[in-house]
Amino acid sequence: MGSRYLARKIFQAILTIAFIVLLNFVLFRMMPGSPDRVLARNLPEAARAELRSRWGLDKPLIPDQLVAYVAATARGDLGASFKFNGRTVVEVLSERIWPTIILFGLGELIAIVVGLSLGAYSGWRRGGPIDYVGNGFSLVLYSMPYFVIGMILLLVFATGLGWFPTSGMFSLGHRFDSFPEQVADFAWHLFLPLMTVAIGLIGQYSILMRSSIIDTLTEDYVTTARAKGLTDGRILRSHALPNARLPAVTLIAINLGYVIAGAITVEVVFNWPGIGTLTVIALNARDYPMLQGIFLLLSISVVLANFAADLVYGYLDPRVRT
Amino acid sequence: MTLADRSPAAIRGRRQWPLPKQADPDAPLLVVEDLRVHFTLESGSVKAVDGVSFTLHDGEALGIAGESGCGKTTTALSLIRLLPSNAKVMGGSVRLFGIDLVPKSENALRRYRWREISLVFQGAMNALNPVQRIGDQIAEPLVTRLGQSQADATRRAGELLELVGIPRQRARAYPHELSGGMRQRAMIAMALACDPAIVIGDEPTTALDVMVQAQILELLERLREELGLSLILITHDLSVIAETCDRVLIMYAGRVAEEGPVSEVFSRPRHPYTQKLLGAFPNIHADRRTLEVIPGAPPDLRTPPPGCRFHPRCPLVLPICSEEVPPEVTFDGVRVACHLYDPASDGTPVPVPSIAIGIDAPITPDDGSGPPEPPAPTFAEAVAEELAASTPAHMPMLDHTLSPERPPGEDR
Amino acid sequence: MTSAPLSAGDLRAERIRLRLRGWVDFARRFARRRDGVAGVVVLLFFTLLALFPTVLVGPLQTATTAPGLPLEPPSLEFPLGTDDLGRSMLNLVVHGARISMVIGLLATVVTVLLGAVIGIASGYLGGRTDTVLMRITDFFLVLPTFVLALILAPIILDLIGSEGVIFGIPSTLVVIVVVIGVTSWASTARIIRSQALSVKERMFVARARVIGGSGAHIMWRHIMPNVLNLIVANTVLVFAGAILTETTLSFIGLGDPLLPSWGVILNSAQTSGAPGLGAWWYFVPPSVCIVLVVLAFTLVGGALDDVLNPRMRARR
């Protein structure tokens, strides 16, 4: 891959992250609703002044507070949570991040494999009854907020049929005799929220891939491939898919920001102890350091994911590698 | 190449791969009879190709010419059934080595694609897969269709590239890294990969500038000589056909208007449409003169005119033209479908009156002053002069084409 | 061909006639798209609900005026059952239509206005302004805007105070509208900018400048009408997105419980444990409404885009 392409993308990512850190700072310090006003509203002025100096809020915003903030962030110090009794933000985040990564990561993986395949097949065999039904179904899913999908699944499979638990990540108060048993319990709890995320994403990805394949099939090189006497399977694999998946990669990357919204709500529906439920807790408690930390974490994750997608795209499409 | 080397037996003997099992060694290379292809649109059925017949012999180059939409591309694509899903071959036969391809199933037909008949498209930018290296694209049919190993196929791809004048190291390049002319050469190399009997070129030079066009034509000429290649060239550019082809087929609105040797058809055109077509072609020899324009437009093929499809625009139309489809009549090896030419007649061409529309006519006062201008030679006459002067036919404007001694790697 | 010169009145009449014909032509072409027409029908239905909720189901029920028992399944008296406070779900859902649509509409207005201003300014002014504006736009495109909205909302709410009222609109509503607008304008800005750029290249802008129009005048009279086509198709899709975003934000708890949009209803459903209790009537009706409305907007937006901006598709 061209080193200029790589360098350009790295630079853009770093620049964006820098702006995110800056934005984070602006949001919480420059807003008149600054921490000391909000938190210590009820304290007498003397105590508030004490707090202010302790938190360094009496120093000028720029450059002192800004530099201090950036330095602290770079060190990995994101402050202490208000809600969680003085535990550091980083501590709480690292506790909560793995459930979210597993739920979200697995969900994306399943959706990419299944969604893109469905969409490719549907676009290839265009016009059959399967295509119309599948496309209509995907369109409806596309319009459904993720938490709606979650609630319905919960109602049908957990409450109604009783096949799955209704909330949480592990059965409460349960003592596990072995690790496999723990994993099984985890998987049992994971299933419904995972299906929710996957189904929501599959709706989007299949529509995307379907229209991409349809566009690709009108291209001249597909006619050339047919003229070469290649089998349909080979044309799809070697000629159509390698080109059709390019816009898919781009759109998956663009989509990531929106999927986060969905993931948060899915966690709420199933009471899955990840970043999503943490966000709601922090919101309700106005735990600003925690909210700041979440914003930073999620934004940087999206930037990194976009960067990864750029790398993948550069690998797949030789035309951008100049 | 001697005449003996160009006999069907000799050409077929030089093939890398044996003839198809069902082939008849005595049959001509390609015989198309009464081919009909219809497109189904929601607004009706388009009779795009309606009774086209022609023959192609080993080592021959046939040019198919006509206006846009006359069905020439559809005819060529339908030979190996490369039509879009709403098109269907409704009748007729396509006999390759005597084997009729029309009734064959898709799977059975696949065997003939690329191995016997291959294709070179116009605008090779889009005709090549943009994310695959051109060497791999050339090698692909060798591996999948002929079962060669990847190593052998890669080596053969390199040889083919050298054959068309591209250094073999360029096999690692992607299509977007090549110039337009090189891409077209790569497409030609790809078309030759399986040593096909026929190569169809669909407007192969249209998207290229004149200098590159000349190079490509010269390449095709060389390949024909060295390999005994049989060619079907589809184009609306008559100068290309004059340069490269032995025979020409003039199509109009899905039917054959005229067909015969290039020298004969271009110097003594018979069908009124052919005459108008040749007259509409700018002639660099002549002084600045007005362009012939054929008034009207090609018919809507959902409801084609009855009888001869050209009759609404024909300057010599007869009453019978709107009633009966003109039968095909042959004189001196030229086939014409026009009521002006009775089977019983001797086939003398009936000249069509010239209708000049003054696009750049000089503004002359209408009082008859000034000397009368001598009539400029028509394109047809000019070609006839050239043919009389030398062989093979050579377009004067292309005199400064590159000589064969130029190193092949250099491309424009 | 000579004729008497046309009067100003004749010219105006001719212009009106042409515009009418344009409208009729558009309507005819749009009517051919069955999906777009279906979408319009659905939207009309919900607009009706939104305009006359009190006429249809009576005033919005509150905790104190709740007529039924909590979480009753659907019956003749309560066709859609009751919520956890005993209010009729039918009543809530119909009133929710108005609230959701109004919030969506206001948020769309803010988004499109912001996007249009930035897009047109950026496209027309060009140069450094364009570069700076586009950098900012790209930044907003990469950012997970939902998370930003999530964080902004409580900040602004605490600023204003959740009891406040601005221009007669409750502050929670204003906050949601502003927050959606401020975070969603980026893609609209990009689309409009690209259109403004292409229009700028066209001849008549140069001609207008020759005649002496000022910069703002040129932007308004000449660039806007052509950009309008694109804005319309895009606006419909923005509306769908705004409704989805508002629903999600309310579901998380940022909505106003006194103004129960569909999202707020769903939040109540979740917090009262309706799915776990099997009370499907609590969350299925508002969900169905949301899906129908978003789907309808998507279909209409797609059909509009096709009709207003036809693209040649190679048919092979």
Image (spheres, rainbow, N blue to C red):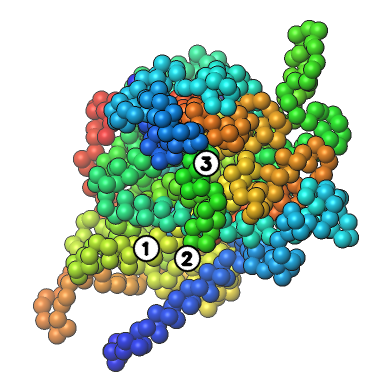
Question: Would you identify the image quadrant in which residue A51 lies?
Answer: top left
Instruction: Look at the picture and state if B18 lies above or below C158.
Output: above
Q: Nearer the viewer, residue A128 or B91?
A: A128
- What separation in Å lies between label 1 and label 3 (alpha carbons)? 36 Å
Pointer 2 residue: B298
Q: Amino acid at mark 2?
A: Pro
Whether residue B228 is situated above or below residue C155 in the rendered picture? above
Residue denoted by label 3: C154
Q: Is residue C208 in sight in this rendering?
A: yes
- The structure residue drawn at horizontal position 43% and vertical position 78%, both measured from the top left corner, is C18
Labels 2, 3: front one? 3
Discs 1, 3 touching: Cβ within 8 Å: no
Q: Is disc 3 placed on a helix, strand or loop? A: helix
Q: Which residue is mark 1?
A: C224
Name the quadrant containing residue C216.
bottom left
Of pointers 1 and 3, the one earlier in the residue sequence: 3
Q: Residue drawn at (61%, 67%), measured in percent from left and top?
A: C31
Chain at tag 2? B
User: Residue A218 placed where, x, y %?
Assistant: 54, 44
Q: What type is the residue that disc 1 sits on?
A: Met
Say how many tags the image has.
3
| 3D distance between C-alphas at marks 1 and 2 | 40 Å
Residue A319 seen in the current view: no
Q: Secondary structure at mark 1?
A: helix
